[in-house]
Image (cartoon, helix red, strand yellow):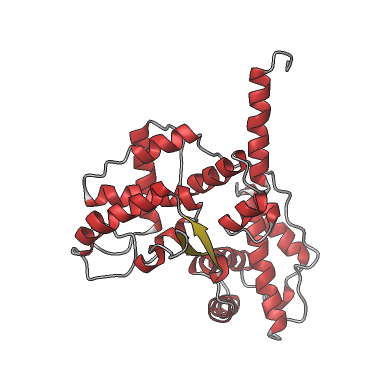
Amino acid sequence: MPAEVLGLVERFLRHTAMERGRSANTVSAYRRDLERWAERLGTRSIGSVSSADITDHLAKLRAEGLASSSITRALSSIRSFHRFLVAEGVADNDPTGSVLAPGRTQRLPKALTIEQVTALLESTPTDTPVGLRDRALLELLYATGGRVSEIVMLAVDDVRPDEVSDVITLTGKGNKQRIVPLGTFARDAIDAYLVRGRPALLAKGAGTPMLFLGARGGPLTRQNTFLIIRAAAERAGITQTISPHTLRHSCATHLLRGGADIRVVQELLGHASVATTQIYTLVTRDALTEAYRTAHPRAT
């Protein structure tokens, strides 16, 4: 890879992390996309890049089997990079201006049924510190619809009961905070974990204010959370592959089916635009149509 381009990539990533305050996950995604772009450029200078080069790069990504969403993200990374170079006076023009993102097929979120969620939550035994932690973690993911990164970054002080109503504060993308309510089940699970589970786990480590702890007393990771959910799904007899995001999807879908206003769900999930939340209305509409076709005598 050309040292010139890689040096500019590192400069852009520092700017993105320090001056724009992007999360570590976002910076890592930029790095992957831009290192692949730099490799594609080979020994060429950054000033020689054209829109045709970028279009060709995106076409090759598609030929390699990348999903449309990943290709769109790659274009976004490349566009941000070249705009930065123009703003810094490194380049005279932005070659990404006329490049269009590939069409994206809309994939509906795969939500669990309420019965599956109940089985998932109740499959976790609460007779050990780890079991108490896992139950509190799963209850909190479903109750709040929080992203896994938001949940694992919670500190103990973040989940103390509010004087007026039982709510917690989640910190989402761009360090934006939002207040979300807790249900009785989630609150009870958290309280049980704080009293009978977390102290035992904390004693194994060096001490940390984070809410969820690993078996050795350190902060629980996102990767650990995936494993916890998959183990719970196996105990509950759920055969489909699920992740923390499945509980987020399920929370949103069940709220809308229960009559919640879409803008309330938007606020709860921390979506910047209601258009992102509207995909869940397609899920509920699909369920409604299926129920009608099954139940109505003249539906078919």
Where residue 121 appears, as percent x and y from the top left, is 38, 41
Q: Is residue 189 visible?
A: yes
Residue 124 placed where, x, y %? 31, 41
Q: Is residue 242 above or below residue 272?
A: above
Q: Quadrant of the C terminus?
A: top right
Q: Is 176 on the left or on the right of 197, as rendered?
A: right
- Judged from this view, the residue extending furthest toward the top is 297
- The structure residue drawn at horizontal position 43% and vertical position 32%, both measured from the top left corner, is 239
Q: Quadrant of residue 259?
A: top right
Residue 192 place in picture, x, y as percent: 28, 52
Residue at far right of view: 98
> Would residue 59 be seen by someone viewing this image from the given angle?
no
As displayed, is residue 138 above or below residue 168?
above
The x, y position of residue 85, in whole percent, is: 68, 79
107 lies left or right of 232: right
Q: Residue at x 58, y 66 (%)?
A: 39
